Image (spheres, rainbow, N blue to C red):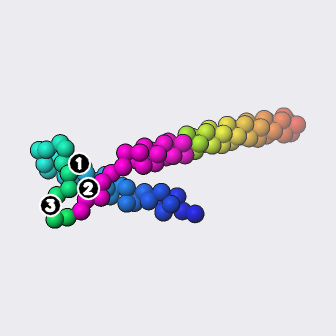
Amino acid sequence: MDFRKIRQIDRKTQQINDYIKKAGSTTNTYSHYRKPSGSSVDKLNPKDIDMLIGEITLMHSRAELYIKFLKKRIHVSSVKQIKSKKIKTNYLF
């Protein structure tokens, strides 16, 4: 299942961008709480956004742990290769 599709990230991102554009163009800071007359506004749900940010943060922390693991494994592997090459060159001389 696609994470973006399940969590409707594109729709929520568009809502946030629309809010930012409207907030920058109006002087009323409470404009996102009211519906303009004649049109419907899809309101942002803070709980949904909070849950989405929490999931993204969790994914980021897991990715960072995995990158640290890979760096450590690569470093250990390269040190072993360097040591084995030194041992081989010592036998030749």
Q: Mark 1 — residue? A: 33
Q: Give percent across and percent down for residue 56.
A: 49, 46
Please name the residue shown 46% across and 45% down the image.
51
* Magenta residues (range): 40-60
Q: Secondary structure at mark 3?
A: loop
Q: Give percent across and percent down for residue 28.
A: 13, 44
Q: Residues within 10 Å of mark 1 (few under 14, many from 20)?
A: few
Q: Nearer the viewer, residue 84 or 18?
A: 18
Disc 2 and disc 3 in contact, CB within 8 angstroms = no
Q: Is residue 82 visible?
A: no
Report the disc number at residue 18: 2
Q: With 38 as the anchor, is 1 left or right in this view?
A: right
Q: Mark 3 — residue? A: 37
Q: CA distance from mark 3 to mark 1?
A: 13 Å
Q: Nearer the viewer, residue 60 or 93?
A: 60
Q: Residue type at mark 3?
A: Ser
